[in-house]
Amino acid sequence: MTKDLAAGRVAVLEDIWKSYGAVPVLRGVSLALGAGEVHALLGGNGAGKSSLMKIIAGIIPANSGRIEINGQFLTHASPALAQELGLYLVPQEAHILPNQSVLENICLGLRASPRALRPRVRTLVQELSVAIDLDAQAATLEIAERQIVEILRGLVRDARVLILDEPTSALTPFETRALFDRVRKLQMQGVGIFFISHKLREIREICSTISVLRDGIIVLSGSLDDYNDGEIVKAMSHVQTSAEGEKTSILAKVAQIGQPRLSVRGLSGEGFRDISLEVRAGEILGLAGVVGAGRTEFAETLFGLRKQFAGSVHLDGVELSQRSPRLCIDKGLVYLPEDRQQNGLFLEAPLFWNVSSYLIHRLPFFLRSSQERLSFDGFRNSMGIKCTSAGQAARGLSGGNQQKVLMAKCLSARPKVLILDEPTRGVDVAARNDIYALIRTLAADGVAIVLISSDFDEIEQLADRVQVMAFGQHGGALVDDISVDAIAKLAFGASEANHA
Amino acid sequence: MLDLFARNRVATLLVILVVAYAAIGAAAPGYLSGATASTVLASSLVLMLISLGTMVVIVTRNIDVSSGSVLGLSAAVLGLSLNAGVGLPLAVALCMLTGVAAGAFNGLMVAYLGIPSIVATLGTLGLYRGIMLVMTGGRWIEDLPQDLKALAGNLGLGFSVLTVVVVAIIGGLWLFLRRTRFGRFFYAVGDNRAAAHHLGVPVRRVQFSAFVATGACAALASIVYSAQIGFIPNQAGNGVELKAIAVNVLGGVSLLGGTGSVAGVVAAVIFITSIDSALVFLKIPAYWNDFIAGALLLSVLLLDGRIRQVIDHRIRARRYAVHDRTPVVEGRDQTSKALEAGL
């Protein structure tokens, strides 16, 4: 047993350096994690968090530095070795084998057979109180369910060190709570946890210590109680954006809310029924609800991606009956999809292709890439997209910047109505504030915005009016007293009131 | 019923095969006989070995188009060493070694040097055939010794030593892919490479092993080939790799990796070979073979695609039906439970 393990430290990182080519990502990072410690790790997009965690988990090698897990050195970069030493990384984007069953997905890589592990996995599922069919094919799982598979993988491995990379970004509030209960239990059993999140409220709830990474070095580290939210956000980025954000918000509210732009009456489709709403120019309508409430299905039906069963949609008073995405874009109804990796971006294509892709049918037969680049550069400057050039592949960008590129793509169509589905999922605080400011500016310019979000804080901050969906139906509306609690009450259906 | 066919390509193939056999049997009495069965079995062996080898690579989401050339190269090594007076066991060992080495070179390029498998094996497709032609001077290898040809001799019931070996390989491969931990890794790597790596699966070793297995299968196929026809033409095995890929697709192996079963491939090989033999029996000119085989392949795949669409549609309808029936009541149950437990 080494000195570190005796001191109750389950993971120790010493002087980790990493660079990709000439670009340094980590510049001498040292961190220690104690048994039973939940350690928050924060940092902006591109600060080096993901690289650091991948290095600890043996997925990528460091250039130099020492890693010790449970008193033993991680001698070479190997996920198998890291897991053997008792560490598991629950990644932000779940790694799923679509053709195998949920159970096989959870048990892959373990010595015991899935059949032998079934009872244990079932117990864990019950303790997490989630509903998941172990025999379903993994391809049929929703994003939230995929996340749960990853969490179960970590639990079934009896890891002594767990890394949770934004574990709640796809979970419902209830699932989040169950996860936190589980984390507390693990904490009591002496498991050390690195908890990566952008939600300060969550971090306050579950973490005891905090480290903030910026530009590859640790700029703040210590007990969470010693720092207030302002100090933490400031440490993450020099740019202080939140006060600015408030100001724009006031401006936006003052701006005139004009004519009804989009009006939907009695729309029914796959996964939702009888939804009506109206958005006016310059208005932000928050469409709240928990994961699985049918909001994405509603938006996709609106945009012509799914079949509609009943109801009507009017844009500026003109009915759009046979909708297709192209028709919607042409008429100025634009949708920003939820899963940017799968539905939104062309990951291998240059950024300017991504931005002009929405209007590809309006471009001349012989493409003039100089113009496309020019239009991209406009967005790049106005939105603060961080990239090396307009020709860079979208894959290389961080989550927040990818999201900005997607927004730019939507804006290139000059939308009258913009439907944003979870626009800030997996986006750091600084980029999130940029996106909020952008949404407000758009509204002030007279765009009607439908903001779909499971993050009720976000809705509270941005929306002029809230409509809630629950279990595929209209769950209620809020106009004046928009608060997280009021939204949560409606999102869970009327049952809470009945129950109380 | 539909579900059965969609999930089970073997069942689909068997049903079509039985119907086809019944039709041909009715049209040409005398076709359905033990003799036909043993002919089909014997003439399926080469394609069987190449297809099984190719399947292992396809399951890991790679492709190998060089196995026809590996067959030719290994056959040349076998024939040349036999004709140089080397004993049969040693010649067979040299032949197998050639196949394994050729597969290992493919595996090295794909798994460790990161060259896309289609590019790497297209290169070796030409390279290995070229080495074979240089070795033989472009001539056919004839006058192979009797003890090699004896391997294809009938032991009874239409079985030869070669058939027994191939059946053993089918059984062994099935056991390996279905029942062992390392076998499961092949599916995992093909299904989602990043996920497999993340979960500690030795991705490169798995990919490498798959190519080595394909090389070994091709070498074995070259022994069967030489024993059965008794000489080695300089184009031995030419084009068999594409037929093997078609067989894999027909047998339900996804070219996107991660799915496929030994049973499906075996059924597809028997299917394709049966058609060839039936055409001979029906005295349809041999130049029709490719046309008919191609048309049948497409029909099975189209039918299969339609069935899959119908089923996807049903699953989707079922999933959303929950909302249509009693959404609020169901939801309420869940939430009140949730509230009791958590909030």
Image: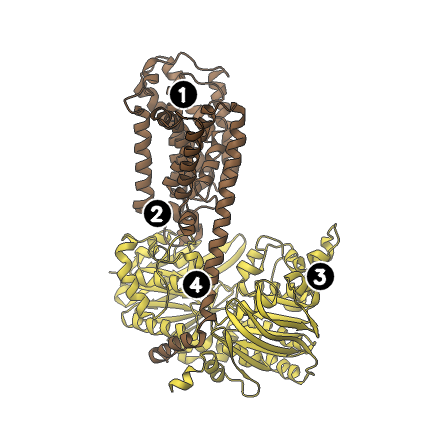
- Where is mark 1, residue-wise? B77
| Amino acid, disc 4 | Val
Pointer 2: residues within 10 angstroms few (<14), some, or many (20+)?
some
Q: Are marks 1 and 2 on the same chain?
A: yes
Give me the C-alpha separation between circle 1 and circle 2.
Answer: 34 Å
Mark 3 lies on residue: A375
- C-beta proximity under 8 Å, tags 1 and 2: no
Vertical placement of B114 versus A415: above or below? above
Name the residue beneath numbered marker 2: B184
The tint of chain A in the picture is yellow
Mark 4 → mark 1, Cα distance in angstroms: 57 Å
Picture coordinates of residue A261, whole percent (x, y) = 68, 76
- Name the front one of labels 4 and 2: 2
Q: Which residue is mark 4?
A: A29
Secondary structure state at the residue bearing disc 2: helix
Q: Chain of mark 1?
A: B
